[in-house]
Image (cartoon, coloured by chain):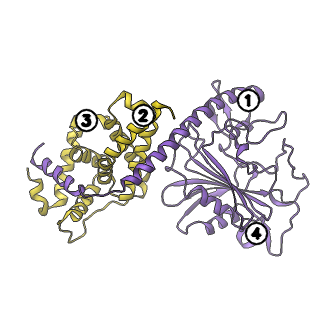
Amino acid sequence: MNAAEDRLSELMDAATCALDPPIDDILAAGERLGRARKRRRHIAVAAGTAVVVLLAGAGVAVGMGDPDFGGDYDAAGHVNGPSHPAMPIPDPLAPSGTTSPVPSPTSTGPFGFDKLKPGPGETPINATAAVNILRKLVAANWKFGDYKPASRGSLLRVDVDDGRGISQIFVGIAPVGSSSMDPVDCSLQGLGLPRATPSSGAKLGLTGLRPISECYVESNTVTGDTAMLEVIAPSASNVVTYRVIVNRRDGVAVEITAQNGDPGSAATEVTRALPPLNVEQWGFIASSPMWQPYVPVSFAE
Amino acid sequence: MGDRESTGLLQYQEFATARAGQLFRIAYLMCGDWHEAQDLVQTCLAKLYSSWHRIQKSESVDAYARKALLHTYLSHRRLRRSGEIPIAEFAEGRAPGDNPELRLVLMEALSTLPPRNRAVMVLRYLDDLSVEDVAGLLGTTPAAIKSICNRSLKQLRALLGDDRELLFQD
């Protein structure tokens, strides 16, 4: 080192020698995060193995290239072009293979709310209304991109930017107990297993095979709502998904999914480290009574 | 927990306790933010913890820790670069005095360097790594590191100006 380099070393040393970071807190947090990381890795390995096994089995059962299965597959089972996101919100109007209540084919209510009628000045909720509601529930500086109904007839898919990168948000709404909404039960989101028990002959979806990092259910004793909160981090991707389903006491179930990238793209293609907010905050947003099957006309225009 | 596991945990804790302070100093000068530095060190320690069994057998744990910290920092920077606001000029009247002020001046000067160059300077001059070691951590050649050091030193000298001339004279 020359003199200038020596001086810089001294300067750096002098500038940082008196720092007094909270070492105990850092050590505790590091160990806690490390333990979670280790646990996630074990889960991911186990789930990855299960995915391979189930994909092979499902490929035989439903045939490769079935568009309902998430896209076309090559001989190795790789997805060539997914036809819908990895976590689509189920189509409330699609026929169900489960034993849960099925929306009537003659229904006129939005998203399976057949028994409800609009009040004066109300109209069925649509993607525009959903964006307007979401805008009111997040910080004012969030930017919203183009939006549209999410695939397969559900409410909304929109790109948002909270100033730290783009994130994809999906919103779905359905009556509590509807077959179009996953049950609020972590045991039914099991690793390597279909999300809900399908009846004989039902097709498995890719979403039913994804590994789940964390999932828990909590009940709000004041409002009577029950929420399932999931953080999903597939082993083969950097895309992290926060997913919440809230069963409200008024009979409305709301599902919101936030992702830090496009799960259909390459594994490393993420737009930010994590989705915006945290899963609890998304649970709070989903539990807002603003989410209703019918909304003021001004919201939907 | 088995004997081997508990021994490994103790070794990890011993290492983390001994090295966390220095890792924090490195992280803090690299990123320039107290809270982000904490995040970086926590993430680095988490990586160490989750791979402890493997790394304690294979390579220098110290080198692994530096590499984990460096890569975590660079990856944070890549994800945050769109929101980063470069500092074009120094605020007036920041004469260096005691350590906090000296630190601020140094941080401002370092913040004008690109993240990779900043990391090189901190590893080279705070952590006292050789040019070869820094090159190894960043997966580049010693010549490239020397070139970064020369350019960055020149830039720092220009930014720190006359007050720091004595510190940076050749």
Q: Label 4 lies in what chain? A: A
Question: Foreground: A284 or A33?
Answer: A33
Q: Residue at x 55, y 69 (%)?
A: A140
Q: Secondary structure at mark 1?
A: helix
Q: Colour of chain A?
A: purple
State the residue position of label 1. Answer: A58
Pointer 3 and pointer 1 on the same chain: no
Q: Are marks 3 and 4 in contact (CB under 8 Å)?
A: no
Q: Residue at x 56, y 35 (%)?
A: A42
Rendering quarter of residue B89: bottom left
Q: Secondary structure at mark 2?
A: helix
State the residue position of label 4. Answer: A295
Q: Secondary structure at mark 3?
A: helix
Q: Check the image and report above or below for A235 versus A112.
A: above
- Left or right placement of residue B112 versus residue A146 in this view: left
Q: Check the image and report above or below for B152 versus A108.
A: above
State the residue position of label 3. Answer: B133
Residue B7, numbered label: 2
